[in-house]
Image (cartoon, helix red, strand yellow):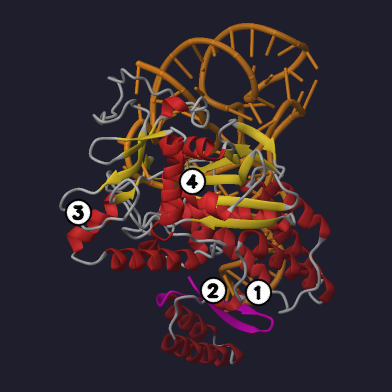
RNA sequence: GGUGCCAUCGCCAAGCGGUAAGGCCGUGGCCUGCAAAGCCACUAUCCCCAGUUCAAAUCUGGGUGGCACCUCCA
């Protein structure tokens, strides 16, 4: 397996720090609003990574956090009149529901910041003791970046003191512009506070990840975990800061490899709250099936920018349709996957998750499968093998797992189905009577309902267009 | 101002020095009562300029045009 390490900025051979075990930490969502397509892409990117590693027979442990305490959440609490837990539980659940719809496998560990307070406080205490952090007037605790000789090694960003060119607003209490808050003291009228040896307050943004990783993974003498992941925008300052505090706390690097996914863009611009062009997953799911959305979002390499638009999504769906069209021709139970196919697919994915290559391997298999079935439609062994191939695709990429006929009928309710069946029967009678004008009229009738009919040797089937 | 990424057929998108994968769309054909689906066939010299090399979309230098990070962000 080769992966692109975003710190080294090159593809590197992946080798776990401990035998066959792979530990991955992925920066999860801050639960103060519904998840958007960017969250989907990040989750999907690492879902594919985990699935690939598992297919390569690694034993993977994925940890994905929920940030359930921070400024934006507090603002939401104040503005909504609801309690902190009401807000965070609501959006955590919605996030999980959205991810389920997209076929994202659940993480093995899903820690929440508010449930990791002991680990967070312990880490800050230790950083203060070791003189890597200082308490400031007012109660804030800052990390002293000047004490970390390797600060900057993750993002390669140079933060200058005289940063007049930068958009950074300097906070007066910091000793150095690179310093960042480990603990934010409670404002006078603030009610959402946590106890700590350094006064009431709440954790800074970066510390929770370090604390959770420290709590859940042990690693070896050089690294705590194998892979640390997240969106490209987290590289700086989030991951730089996280790496710094972890390094100073434990004396070892937090992660051996860093992987970052690219952005989802709308009309060529980054999708973000401030630009007002966010696209919520739940809204996309109203118009498209979760699997179709999933397939579209994973079809572009994870490090590239992803420009979302509905025409491309439609085109992408047609590609997925082809997989199901083949599956439609297959029996319900398989035998074993074609070795050459499996190897080619894994080989593609082992190259830093080369999804384009993988999809072309699949398209090739589908084309050859159809052709072979055209030639020899009764070949049971072939059919079983083809089904097994699709089952392997499902395991590796999380697509193609549905029952084929129902895939093409998603979103059609029972009463409509009954109507369709009735018209279909009528049309069959017309066809038997060679009344093709009537048969075509009935087909037109269904077409007007968005239903397409396809006549096959074994009868007529219908699909939603 | 600093730091990066990107530019390949109408559209999406591989390629990482050896002579342009795949999908969508389109055209022609087979199949079909007609269709749909499927199958077959056809469709690019890689933003521009210069250089390195026997050989460059791939490396180097210089342009041009996008995008991102340096502020909460996936």
Chain identity of mark 3 = A
Q: Are marks 2 and 1 in contact (CB under 8 Å)?
A: yes
Chain identity of mark 2 = A
Are the residues under badges 2 and 4 in a single subunit?
A: yes
Q: CA distance from mark 2 to mark 4?
A: 45 Å
Say if the magenta span includes residue A456: yes
Q: CA distance from mark 2 to mark 1?
A: 10 Å
Left or right: A112 as drawn, with respect to A196: right
| Residue A137 image position (x, y, % from top left) | 24, 35
| Circle nearer the N terminus (2, 4) | 4
Q: CA distance from mark 1 to mark 4?
A: 48 Å
Q: Which residue is mark 1?
A: A328
Against A324, residue A433 (above or below) is: below
Q: Which mark is residue A190?
A: 3
Q: CA distance from mark 3 to mark 2?
A: 53 Å
Q: Which residue is mark 4?
A: A210
Left or right: A225 as drawn, with respect to A82: right
Q: Residue at x 74, y 78 (%)?
A: A333
For the residue carrying disc 3, how many other residues have a C-alpha within 10 Å: few (<14), some (14-19), or many (20+)? Answer: few
Query: Magenta segment, which residues?
Result: A448-465
């Amino acid at each position: 397996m080769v992966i692109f390490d975003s710190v080294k900025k090159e593809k590197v051979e992946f080798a776990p720090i401990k035998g066959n075990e792979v530990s991955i930490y992925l920066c999860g969502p801050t639960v103060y609003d519904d998840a958007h397509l960017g969250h989907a892409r990040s989750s999907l990117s690492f879902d594919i990574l985990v699935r690939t590693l598992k297919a390569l027979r690694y034993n993977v442990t994925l940890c994905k956090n929920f940030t359930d305490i921070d400024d934006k959440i507090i603002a939401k609490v104040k503005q909504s009149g609801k309690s902190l837990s009401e807000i965070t539980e609501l959006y955590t659940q919605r996030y999980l529901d959205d991810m389920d719809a997209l076929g994202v496998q659940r993480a093995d560990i899903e820690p929440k910041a508010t449930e990791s307070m002991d680990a967070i406080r312990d880490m800050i205490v230790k950083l203060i003791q070791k003189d890597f952090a200082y308490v400031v007037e007012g109660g804030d605790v800052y990390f002293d970046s000047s004490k970390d000789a390797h600060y900057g090694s993750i993002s390669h960003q140079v933060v200058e003191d005289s940063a007049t060119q930068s958009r950074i607003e300097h906070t007066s209490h910091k000793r150095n512009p690179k310093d960042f808050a480990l603990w934010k003291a409670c404002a006078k009228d603030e009610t959402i506070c946590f106890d700590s040896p350094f006064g009431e307050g709440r954790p800074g943004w970066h510390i929770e990840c370090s604390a959770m990783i420290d709590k859940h993974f042990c690693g070896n003498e050089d690294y705590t975990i194998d892979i640390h992941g997240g969106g490209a925008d987290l590289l700086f300052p989030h991951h730089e800061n996280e790496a710094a505090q972890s390094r100073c706390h434990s004396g070892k690097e937090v992660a051996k490899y860093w992987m970052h996914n690219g952005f989802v863009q709308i009309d060529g611009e980054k999708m973000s709250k401030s630009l007002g062009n966010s696209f919520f997953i739940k809204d996309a799911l109203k118009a498209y099936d979760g699997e179709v959305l999933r397939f579209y979002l994973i079809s572009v390499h994870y490090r590239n920018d992803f420009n979302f638009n509905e025409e491309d999504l439609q085109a992408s769906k047609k590609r997925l349709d082809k997989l199901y069209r083949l599956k439609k021709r297959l029996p319900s139970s398989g035998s074993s996957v074609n070795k050459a196919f499996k190897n080619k697919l894994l080989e593609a994915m082992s190259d830093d998750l080369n999804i384009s290559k993988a999809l072309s391997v699949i398209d090739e298999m589908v084309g050859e499968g159809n052709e072979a079935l055209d030639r020899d439609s009764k070949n049971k062994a072939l059919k079983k093998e083809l089904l097994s191939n699709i089952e392997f695709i499902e395991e590796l990429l999380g697509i193609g797992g549905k029952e084929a006929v129902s895939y093409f009928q998603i979103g059609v309710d029972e009463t409509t189905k009954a109507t369709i069946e009735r018209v279909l029967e009528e049309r069959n009678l017309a066809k038997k009577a060679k009344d093709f004008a009537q048969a075509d009229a009935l087909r037109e009738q269904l077409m007007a309902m968005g239903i397409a009919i396809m006549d096959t040797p074994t009868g007529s089937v219908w699909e939603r267009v």
